[in-house]
Image: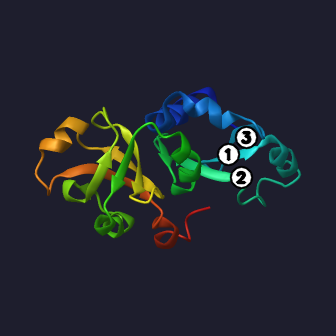
Amino acid sequence: MRPLTDEETKTMFEKLSKYIGENIRLLIDRPDGTYCFRLHNDRVYYMSERILKLATNISRDKLVSVGTCFGKFTKTQKFRLHITALDFLAPYAKFKVWVKPGSEQSFLYGNHIMKSGLGRITENTAQYQGVVVYSMADVPLGFGVAAKTTQECRMVDPMSIVVFHQADIGEYIRSEDTLT
């Protein structure tokens, strides 16, 4: 387990800023202590510095996971967010999308959100902006990328895709053997 390099930190923070903007600093400097990001087996973990000190007593080959997995670096050094980061991204999300109850199940199976399933969308959402997807009861379901702007969503036909699926809480069941 090691700290992220400058290039890795830049890549990860660019991805996080698509979803939470400048609120990234709120993840690091929290009122309950100082938190940090560490890399282990191409996965980025988010943990308190107190847990980090305890984890240094375990050898790297024996350590499976520590803290919360925020995502992983692909072989081409791109950062991919995991669904396990949703609990930390949702409170700070700048752009949100609410889906109708009939479309929740479709999204949780890994499908994109159609205009017919869109309940609400945050004003001034840009195209290809990262969004956090909520149910109408304000339960975070996952995150994705806006396929259309807020204004385009009003004019488009009901079967057009408005949010591209990226991750959802159904992945806990679909990919339980690969999530760590």
Q: Which of pointers 3 and 2 lies earlier in the amino acid sequence?
A: 3
The answer to whether the residue labelled 2 contacts the one labelled 1, judged by CB atoms less than 8 Å apart, is yes
Figure quadrant of the C terminus: bottom right
Residue at the extreme front: 137
The residue tagged 3 is 2
Q: Secondary structure at mark 1?
A: strand
* Residue located 27% across and 36% down the image: 127
Query: To which residue does mark 2 refer?
Result: 67
The total number of labels drawn is 3
Residue 142 falls left or right of residue 105 = right
On the image, the x and y values in percent for residue 22 come to 53, 27
Between disc 3 and disc 2, the foreground one is 2
Residue found 71% across the figure and 52% down from its top: 67
Report which quarter residue 32 is drawn in.
top right
The residue sitting at 35% across, 40% down in the picture is: 122
Question: Is any atom of residue 13 visible in this view?
Answer: yes
Q: Which mark is residue 46?
A: 1
Residue 128 in the image: above or below residue 81: above
Q: Is the residue under label 1 in contact with that under label 3 (CB below 8 Å)?
A: no
Q: CA distance from mark 3 to mark 2?
A: 14 Å
Residue 47, x across and y down, in percent? 73, 46
| Type of the residue with mark 1 | Tyr
